[in-house]
Image (tube, rainbow, N blue to C red):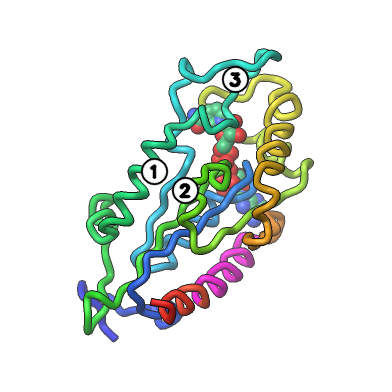
């Protein structure tokens, strides 16, 4: 089937009038890497990344150890993020266009579309208004050592001060995770140590089934 715009539809992705949201978490687990590969693979998809909503450093308070508290919801403009998600939900096609992304409308009917929003972030399941929207939730996990190693290679703005990972980031990861522990039955856990290509293939396969399921439900 040829799509409007002259592109062929990828037969792996079934057409459907679906607005799906999926989500990833854990710092340095590989969320951004996987999300951007998925976005390239899935027609009519786009990413909203929680990292884009951090408040200015001057607005982020310090804890009693002198560490900036970046790993709490209050460090993020969550209402702004929610507003963008709502805007996508209202009209995904125009949202995609605003992001400079090409829509791939599938004949014969414009109603017969798949629109997938990929939400990636380290603290999204902890924000209930967002959490309850997701059709599919993925939790990327890596062990402490790998997380610490990957994090040591990243330069955030501002950069992590000495001792930040052990003194703040990892304890906050455990705390934030504990907060959502009762929901974990809904997650598909992904081993972030697996090769990127393997993770991408597994999620693509899973999502294709999910889209089909949503399509049948609609
Ligand atoms: N599957 C993987 N295997 C090995 N390294 C990875 C993998 N996925 C991501 N990385 C690397 O880990 C670091 C953090 O990845 P990133 O996608 O930015 O994580 P996150 O968005 O979860 O913080 C980057 O250097 C990236 O290249
Ligand atoms: N403005 C920023 O982007 C910024 C600043 C300081 C720390 N961080 C860190 O970003 C992490 C979350 O992002 P990742 O999931 O991409 O690692 C948090 O653990 C937080 O400590 C981000």
Question: Is label 1's Cβ within 8 Å of ligand 2?
Answer: no
The residue depicted at 63 percent of the width and 60 percent of the height is 187
**Residue 27 in the image: above or below residue 70:** below
Dot 3 falls on a residue whose secondary structure is: loop
**Residue 163 in the image: above or below residue 49:** above
Residue corresponding to mark 3 = 68
Horizontal arrangement in the rendering, residue 211 relative to residue 95 (left or right)? right
Give the CA separation, mark 1 to mark 2: 7 Å
Tell me the crowding category of disc 2: few under 14, some 14 to 19, or many 20 or more residues within 10 angstroms, Cα based: some
Looking at the rendering, the stretch of residues picked out in magenta corresponds to 195-208
Q: Quadrant of the N terminus?
A: bottom left
Residue corresponding to mark 1 = 82
- Which quadrant of the view contains residue 106? bottom left
Image spot of residue 165 (x, y percent)? 71, 29
Earlier residue among tags 3 and 2: 3
- Which quadrant of the view contains residue 126? top right
The residue depicted at 68 percent of the width and 31 percent of the height is 169
4 in magenta: no
Image spot of residue 196 (x, y percent)? 61, 60
Horizontal arrangement in the rendering, residue 44 relative to residue 21 (left or right)? left
Tell me the crowding category of disc 1: few under 14, some 14 to 19, or many 20 or more residues within 10 angstroms, Cα based: some
Give the CA separation, mark 3 to mark 2: 25 Å
Give residue 144's mark: none
Residue corresponding to mark 2 = 130
Q: Is residue 156 visible?
A: no
Q: Marks 1 and 2: CB-CB under 8 Å? A: yes
Question: Is label 3's Cβ within 8 Å of ligand 2?
Answer: yes
């Amino acid at each position: 089937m040829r799509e409007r715009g002259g592109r062929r539809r990828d037969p792996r992705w079934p057409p459907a009038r679906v607005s799906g949201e999926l989500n990833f978490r854990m710092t340095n687990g590989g969320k951004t890497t996987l999300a951007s590969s998925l976005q390239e693979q899935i027609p009519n998809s786009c990413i909203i990344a929680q990292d884009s909503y951090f408040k200015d450093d001057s607005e982020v308070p310090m804890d009693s150890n002198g560490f900036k508290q970046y790993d709490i919801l209050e460090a993020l403009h969550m209402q702004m993020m929610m507003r963008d998600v709502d805007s996508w939900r209202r009209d995904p096609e125009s949202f995609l266009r605003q992001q400079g992304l090409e829509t791939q409308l599938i004949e014969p009917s414009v109603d017969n579309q798949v629109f997938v929003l990929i939400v990636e972030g380290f603290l999204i399941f902890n924000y209930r208004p967002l959490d309850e929207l997701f059709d599919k939730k993925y939790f990327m996990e890596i062990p402490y050592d790998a997380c610490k190693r990957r994090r040591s290679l990243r330069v955030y703005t501002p950069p992590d001060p000495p001792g930040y990972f052990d003194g703040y980031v990892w304890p906050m990861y455990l705390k934030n995770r504990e907060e959502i522990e009762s929901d974990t039955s809904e997650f598909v856990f992904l081993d972030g140590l697996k090769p990127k290509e393997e993770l991408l293939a597994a999620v693509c396969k899973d999502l294709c089934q999910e889209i089909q399921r949503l399509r049948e439900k609609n």
